[in-house]
Amino acid sequence: MTELKQQIIDYIVKNSDIFTNLSDEIWANPELSLKEYRSAALYEKVLEENGFRVEKNFDDIETAFTGTFGSGHPVIGILGEYDALSGLSQERGALSHKPLKSGAPGHGCGHNMLGTGALAAAFGIKHYLETSGHEGTVIFFGCPGEEGGAAKAFMARDGIWKDLDAALTWHPEDVNEVKTGTNNSTIQIMYDFHGVSAHAAGDPEHGRSALDAVELMNTGVQYLREHMTSDCRVHYAITDAGGVSPNVVQEHATVLYMVRAGKVRNCVELLKRVDKIAEGAALMTETNFTRTFIDGTADLVPNFTLENVLFENFKEVGLPTYTDEEISFAKALSSTCPENTAPGFASKFDDTIREFTEEHSEHGKCGINNFLIPLYHSTAFQAGSTDVGDVSWETPTAQIHVAGFVNGAPGHSWQNVSCGGSSIGHKALLQAGKVLACAAVDLYEKPEILKEARAEFEKRTACGYVCPIEDGAKPIAI
Ligand SMILES: [Zn+2]
Ligand SMILES: [Zn+2]
């Protein structure tokens, strides 16, 4: 560990209350996607008080903002998120499902940690730029609506990420690893069908059923499914069935569609086929429909050069130490989760790494996976989507996972809310801040790394970015 990096780590530790208190505050006041008014205001205040230049309402998105420090290149973006999930209210540190308030939201994806860990990194980088006098800029991006809304993808449509030399971020998981591989692309569209209401028995010939149109659309898509490539998925939810009276011809009905494909350009093409089915359903039922673009995300472009930098720094920073109390809590909480003997992405593909993780996780019994999974590079596809994907099409991007959840904890679970509000969550976010800040220092200090990362990025994105966000669309909270 160089003295320079040690100073950054010391600075993050010295200021740790700022990050852990903010994490707790956001954990205790969870806000849904694109409605993170309180959380965004808290971040903006902390950034302003600590010498960052703050831009609110960034890219015309109310709960998006940036905090900038420094000038000139390299420009490193640090991505933070802070939205919660509905229905996941949960008592902090509890070992069973105990909502604090029934039906209320909760931080089941750990974005209370994600944003504040990223903030810790931005603080560490600012300290480095200040004390070293090195030319360069750090921008903390407050990215709302990751769970729904995909603000980063809207920003990508507007070319925001093109100005960066690199972007770094992290996500709490049940392991410590450098993220590699890719995710799938997704697009959501709301189809609102409009028909003509009538008495279903007395006057049916004058009725035109919007619900029939939704049903026919769903049937049409059912036939489409056989004729898609195997990486594609089409999901739907009927969000308005036109009322609860069967004796009324439904004048309105709405279906929300989500299409997925391994590659974003294929996702856009698949959506065109779903649109045609909507048109067919309207034609058959003599109804019409309005189509509202909701959001979309691209597949993730990995960057092995940056993954190497993150891994070296993860190794150098070392891992947190846990108290006996934290370990027994983690073991007890982990015992409520599905069995997970070989955690981590690479364990699914690499036998040596799988043996390593089996052994180190004590065959899934360790509670918290307090070890770093060996470096593994992959372009393999992992189901699930993230709007970090869109960032990665415009600038070299890389991420780490830090164990902020217990072994085996399912995504979006009460276990994650319970753990993410505990001292284990604090340790995870500080860990992420340290690793990302130290990795960024390498990017400022060694221009050849950024050059290599850029060359790799150019090669991987040579086919061009097809943005899933339609022109003129605005982020919508649904
Ligand atoms: Zn999530
Ligand atoms: Zn998440």
Image (cartoon, rainbow, N blue to C red):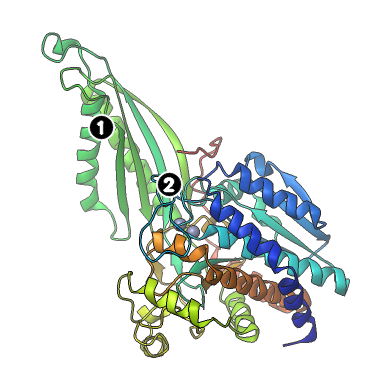
The residue under the point 53% across, 50% down is 83
**In the displayed structure image, the side of residue 116 where residue 375 appears, left or right:** left
Image quarter where the C terminus lies is top left
Residue occupied by mark 1: 214
Residue occupied by mark 2: 101
Residue 258, x across and y down, in percent: 36, 46
Q: In this view of the protein, can residue 385 be seen by the observer?
A: yes
Above or below, 288 relative to 462? above
**In the displayed structure image, the side of residue 286 where residue 420 appears, left or right:** right
Q: In this view of the protein, can residue 392 be seen by the observer?
A: no
Q: Which mark is residue 25?
A: none
**In the displayed structure image, the side of residue 439 where residue 367 appears, left or right:** left
In this view, the residue in front, 102 or 277, is 102
In this view, the residue in front, 212 or 85, is 85
Toward the right, the furthest residue is: 133
Q: Local crowd at mark 1 within 10 Å, few (<14), some, or many (≥20)? A: many
In this view, the residue in front, 36 or 180, is 36
Element under disc 1: helix
The residue under the point 54% across, 58% down is 111
The residue under the point 71% across, 64% down is 122
Query: Count the marks: how many?
Result: 2
Q: CA distance from mark 2 to mark 1?
A: 35 Å
The kind of residue tagged 1 is Val
The quarter of the rendering in which ligand 1 is drawn is: bottom left
Toward the left, the furthest residue is: 201
Residue 93, x across and y down, in percent: 46, 65
Residue 467, x across and y down, in percent: 52, 49
* Label 2 with label 1: CB-CB less than 8 Å: no
